[in-house]
Amino acid sequence: MAKFDVFGTTMIAIQHQDQWQLSIDSGLGLRRPVKDVVLPPSLDENELAQYLGDIYHEWATDRHPHIVKLS
């Protein structure tokens, strides 16, 4: 599991059966699956931040200019 702050939105990527499943984390224990983005199964966890940045770059703001990997 990899957790990211994607320009102010917390997203979680879980690898299941060699496929990445992306969801938005509500912060309250609820996750909403992201169905309109497919993460290539060949990506490793270290490449996810760059890929998410390429997809969601329009979400960037002065307050949230980067993607941050969360622990």
Image: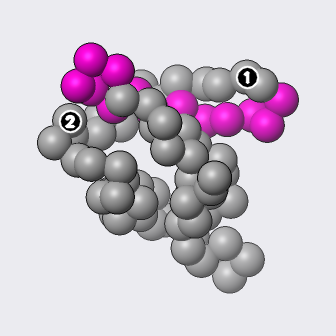
Residue at the location (41% across, 60% down)?
49
Picture coordinates of residue 22, whole percent (x, y): 45, 33
* Residue at image point 16% right, 42% down: 42
Dot 2 falls on a residue whose secondary structure is loop
**Between 15 and 10, the one nearer to me in the picture:** 15
Magenta-span inclusion, residue 19: yes
Residue 6: name its quadrant.
Answer: bottom right
- Judged from this view, the residue extending furthest toward the right is 28
Note whether residue 43 is visible. Answer: yes
Task: Examine the rendered structure and indicate whether residue 42 appears above or below residue 6.
Answer: above
Asked whether disc 1 touches disc 2, contact meaning CB atoms under 8 Å apart, the reply is no
Please identify the residue farthest to the front as the structure is shown.
71
User: Which one is in front, 52 or 13?
Assistant: 13
45 on left or right of 26 = left
- Image location (x, y in percent) of residue 24: 60, 36
Question: Hey, what amino acid is under mark 2?
Answer: Pro
23 lies above or below 47:
above
- Which residue corresponds to mark 2? 41
The residue carrying pointer 2 sits among few (fewer than 14), some (14 to 19) or many (20 or more) residues within 10 Å by Cα, namely few
Distance between mark 1 and mark 2 Cα atoms: 24 Å
Q: Which residue in the protein does label 1 denote?
A: 30
Q: Residue at x 49, y 44 (%)?
A: 2
Principal secondary structure, stretch drawn in magenta: strand
Q: Is residue 25 left or right of residue 2?
A: right
Label 1 neighbour load within 10 Å: few <14, some 14-19, many 20+: few
Up/down of 34 relative to 51, above or below: above
